[in-house]
Amino acid sequence: MEVWVSIIISVCAASTPLLLAATGELVVERSGVLNLGVEGMMIIGAVTGFSVAQVTGNPYLGALAAVAAGAFFSLLFAFLTLTLVANQVATGLALTILGLGLSGMIGEGFVGQPGIKMQALEIPLLSDIPVFGKLLFGQDLIFYLSIALVFGVSWFLFRTRAGLMLRSVGDSHTSAHALGINVIRIRYLAVLFGGACSGLAGAYLSLVYVPQWVEGMTAGRGWIALALVVFASWRPARLLVGAYLFGAVTIAQFHAQATGIAIPAQFLTSLPYIATIVVLVLIARNRRATIINTPASLGKPFVPDH
Amino acid sequence: MRLELQKRPQSSKALAYLSPFIALGLTLVAGAIMFTLLGKNPATALYTYFVEPLFDPWARDQIILKATPLILIAVGLAVCFRSGNWNIGAEGQYLFGGMVGAMIPIYFNDWQSPLLLPMMMLMGMIGGALYGYIPAILKSRFGTNEILTSLMLVYVAQQLVDWLVRVPWRNPQGMGFPGTKSFNESAVLPDLMAGGDAHYGAVFAILAAVLMWFMLSKTLKGFEVTVLGQSPRAGRFAGFSARQMTVFAFCLSGALAGLAGIAEVSGSVEKLDDKLSLGYGFSAIIVAFLGRLNPLGIIAAGFILALSYIGGESAQIMLGISDRATRVFQGMLLFFVLACDTFIHYRVRFIPTPNKVNA
């Protein structure tokens, strides 16, 4: 039993960064913007979180700084695509390339240093309950935040007026604009939120999951988060399923490597990526569901006529 | 104050040519600021980065060597991007092409023949094209997002090559280092100049760029690429098939990336190892945009990016500037290129915020 508890906790740890980044990107895409820079914002969050935690000795300050850094970095993307209507795909790629380069430079002095791990919250008494205590009440703060965020975002998008406005901007920016909604402002806010979430996702990697600074440590997780949004067909609750499925594949793959199964480690390492492709194909085959849920203005530039 | 965009009645021709240069200028300014922040003299740093290598024959040879894969991959990407297909997995097609092309000298290490090199290059292109075919067929058959699938395949290709050079193809006399046996002479692409590193791949790159330029600007196929890229609807009315175009564009750019891969394997490394990829597939995206998706512009852009790699190496040796600065440069460059593109189509006006009047 103890073994299973620790396996499930490690699945949670592998899933949390994916879930966080995907939740942020879901809001961005619901507003009609496709930000492919998730990987770049994540790695900026990872290096900021790690370095601030090293300097201050406090992982929570590190996580906060990562949120701010991710949001600030996404502002670059927002300015280019929303104010200057640059191509969203290309700008997202630019964000990723710049993020990977910049993080390598910032983190150069931190390579190989032992990190400061954000400790799990042990809620007295409750976390002592056998099996469920540790799972439900003995994890780190960001894990709880990631779960709360999914439900918060779901509530925001489908139960609030502001959420309705955001979705309307994503579905038809011209109609929303005609109704007097400030399309560009809403999209700016959505992109900033996405950046903050990606930043936190990165900090989770360098403060909880690994916890160390390794160059390029996001290893494609930002891209998997993007795929998860498609998998979830832009519904926050389904992100939970997707993220945990991928977390489970990642952990299963680690355990298979550890048992010395006669499958090459490289094949196991590439499993999450292959799984992503398979999932994308399966989802795309169900065209009706995809078409109904895809924000209709996704990736399309908008220039307001003043 | 806020910015307001006004669509130009006609796109500015002059700016279309000027914008890459403006972007380069802005990147240099941003680079100077970055070096100052790092506590280096910005003038010396920029000189070491972008001027000094041009006067050094060894560095010039290295620039040609690095520009070769960048140009080859980027001209293929230009066709892809122009047709509205986002192939960002060129890195994977480069690796896969290099791997497939290397098969003959790996399995028939002693075979010598003048046919060998053409066969290797051809197999490299086929390998790259096949690997590009996967995201293309998934997109055209199932509507799968090609950005994500092509990128995921990069990771798969990296792992595959890593496994091949460590386990089944590893040189038994290689002291345990990952990598195959070195190829024999007739499997090695000749050098451009005796004693240099740059090889005939550079000739392929220039040829490919000219051919692609011809195709895009002078043939019906090129017209089809542009129409489908700018308006898939108009393309449909003209009887062009967007699905076939996806397959065509991906296979073409895959083939060129594969050629880049096998040219690098055969001309530069002379065996297959785990260090084949230096991220050329991603830098080539920057090259494609800096060349404004024009194959002839891409030749120049490829040399500029190659210069930044070589300049970065010498700046690291001589000034102790981290070689990561090169990637930062490249990222900034792409940002500025994309930002400057706006000014071709739009006039930007600054509108002062009206002062609040107290009633």
Image (cartoon, helix red, strand yellow):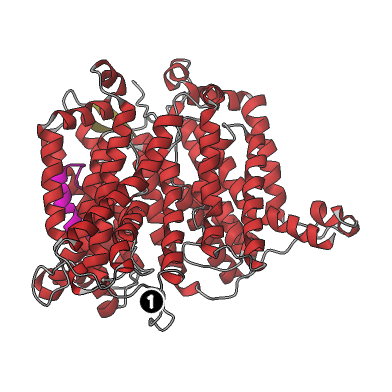
Q: Residue at x 14, y 68 (%)?
A: B190
Q: Residue at x 62, y 61 (%)?
A: A61
Q: Residue A5 or B240: which is nearer the viewer?
A: B240
Left or right of residue A229: residue A153: right
Q: Examine the rendering and report whether any part of residue A26 can be seen.
A: no
Query: Circle 1 is placed at which residue position?
Result: B171
Q: Chain of mark 1?
A: B
**Looking at the picture, which amino acid does disc 1 mark?**
Asn
Quadrant (top left/top right/bottom left/bottom right) for the C terminus of chain A: top left
Q: Is residue B296 magenta?
A: yes
Q: Residues within 10 Å of mark 1 (few under 14, many from 20)?
A: some
Q: Residue B323 or B170: which is nearer the viewer?
A: B170
Left or right of residue B255: residue B209: left
Q: Is residue A232 magenta?
A: no
Q: Which residues are magenta?
A: B291-305
Left or right of residue B169: residue A265: right
Query: What is the quadrant of residue B116 in the picture?
Result: bottom left
Q: Position of residue A155 (x, y in %)?
A: 68, 31
Circle 1 SS class: loop
Eyeballing the image, is A50 above or below B139? Answer: below
Left or right of residue B234: residue B114: left
Q: Position of residue B59 (x, y in %)?
A: 16, 72
Q: Residue at x 50, y 34 (%)?
A: A29
Eyeballing the image, is B107 above or below A72? Answer: below
Q: Residue B138 or B42: which is nearer the viewer?
A: B138
Q: Position of residue B257 (x, y in %)?
A: 27, 52
Eyeballing the image, is B111 above or below B31? Answer: below
Q: Main secondary structure of the magenta part?
A: helix
Q: Residue B253 or B336: which is nearer the viewer?
A: B253
Query: What is the quadrant of residue B224 in the picture?
Result: top left
Q: Position of residue B313 (x, y in %)?
A: 26, 72
Quadrant (top left/top right/bottom left/bottom right) for the N terminus of chain A: bottom right
